[in-house]
Image: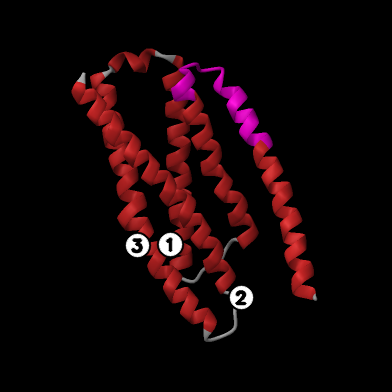
Amino acid sequence: MELYNYIKSLHLIFVITWFAGLFYIVRLFVYQIEANDKPSPEKEILQKQYKIMTYRLWYIITWPSAVLATLFAIWLLILMPAWLQTAWMHVKLGFVVLLIAYQIKCHLIYAALQNDVFKYSSNFMRLWNEGATIILFAVVFLVILKNAFNWVYGVIGIVLFSVLIMLGFKFYKRIRERKSNH
């Protein structure tokens, strides 16, 4: 059982660094997109710096953390195969698939920005950043409650919280626009 605790600890550490990378990469996307609207030479200086920062975050922290968290999760499932018979684990694995899809989409955005292709606005990226937050809340509630249905209340709560964040974001955006017009 001691091996299990070490593997679980490593899994949790890499899940935390994976999410940290996902949260920060999207924030860097916001900055990179906004830098594109700056005048020269500020635009070029910022773009170069953000490309370096996103590259390092993406390939030194986020992708390795995703791979290691997944490998340790598989190891945990090998140690505890009965979990695969539980409904909460099926739902959790569904959210893990969603998280991997989210990371792949972030990778496509990352690749486009590295090639100076700007498909999304900074406002879209601010909202996109909430995707990882919702997945995190759902998975934490699932793992703690170990109930395939009670997590719904947690997700409903985070969706309502996200709506409040979006309303706050719109309010903040109006304040920024008013300040920039004065």
Horizontal relation, residue 142 to residue 130: left or right: left
Closer mark to the observer between disc 2 and disc 1: 2
Number of residues whose C-alpha sits closer than 10 Å to that of mark 3, classed few (under 14), some (14–19) or many (20 or more)? few
| Figure quadrant of the N terminus | top left
**Looking at the magenta stretch, what is its main secondary structure?**
helix
Q: Mark 1 is on which residue type?
A: Ala
* Residue located beneath label 3 in the image: 56
* Residue located beneath label 1 in the image: 111
Horizontal relation, residue 127 to residue 11: left or right: right
Q: Mark 2 is on which residue type?
A: Asp
Percent x, y of residue 12: 34, 35
* Sequence-earlier tag: 2 or 1: 2
Helix, strand or loop status at disc 2: loop
* Residue located beneath label 2 in the image: 37
* Sequence-earlier tag: 3 or 2: 2
C-alpha separation, residue under disc 3 versus residue under disc 2: 23 Å
Q: Mark 3 is on which residue type?
A: Arg
- Which residue is pictured at 24% across the width and 30% down the height? 7
Number of residues whose C-alpha sits closer than 10 Å to that of mark 1, classed few (under 14), some (14–19) or many (20 or more)? few
